[in-house]
Amino acid sequence: MQAVVLAGGLATRMHPHTLRVPKSMLEVAGRPFVDWQIESLARWGFDDIVMCIAHLGEAIRRHVGDGSRFGVRVSWSEEGVRLLGTAGALRKALGRLEPTFLVTYGDSFLPFDYSEPLRLLNEHDDCDGVMAVFKNDGKWDASNVQCAGDWVARYEKGTHDAELDHIDYGATALRRGVVTALPEGQPYGLDAVQRDLAARKRLRACMARERFYEIGSPDGLSELDRLLRSQAHS
């Protein structure tokens, strides 16, 4: 199973720390965050990981290497000087993508079965993607998803609407054909891809039961640090 990690962002909310250290290398519970993330993916059966990097990405590459010490195979896709956005980074990595794969963000730590969205995608030919969602009700961040049974009915970022009571959990399984159709070399956001799939009724929902964690903000990093340290002592 293949997972793609989008780890090329500028991480401006974490300045000044990320002016010299990429977000994936920030220390969480005594280790670089990327260690926790790769180990979590490996625990759920992912043995092929593509790291999409840009800002200070060489530091991540030096640390992770080929992934063998994590029991996985890691390959690398570099955006280059011009940032291409989350979907643009996927398009740049097209030659490395399997027919179906999971994509997640380089600052997300998700306490759920990472393999479930990919399993659902491979079981159903009536969709082109499966988004992990969480019944958020605006608690952890702004909700952006409306579900209808097993489907994402609507995906809207930056919209205050009571019907948007779920949130994009941070892990979506996609078919490579979705990425092939994107404009090559042009900045493009994954949110636009997800919004389009939902509008065309091609995006299934996979329900996560526990809240998500992220290191994209100081508070988020502190919360995850406390969680991982408490688990280590339990």
Image (cartoon, rainbow, N blue to C red):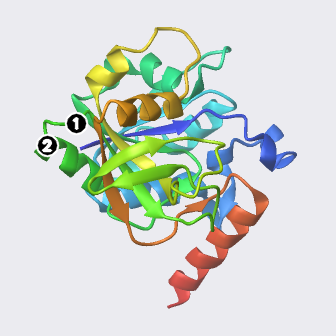
Kindly identify the amino acid type of the residue bearing the numbered disc 1: Cys
Label 2: state its secondary structure. loop
Determine which residue is flagged by label 1: 127
Q: Hey, which quadrant is residue 80 in on the image?
A: top right
Residue tagged by mark 2?
Answer: 124
State the residue in front, 38 or 103: 103
* Residue at x 53%, y 8% (from the top left corner): 185
Work out which residue is located at the far bottom of the displayed protein and give it. Answer: 234
138 or 101: nearer the viewer: 138
Taking the spot 44% from the left edge, 25% from the top edge, the residue there is 90
163 sits left or right of 46 in the view: right
Q: Can residue 151 be seen in this view?
A: yes
Vertical position of residue 130 compared to residue 217: above or below: above
Q: How many marks?
A: 2
Quadrant the N terminus occupies: top left
Residue 10: horizontal and vertical position, in percent? 72, 34
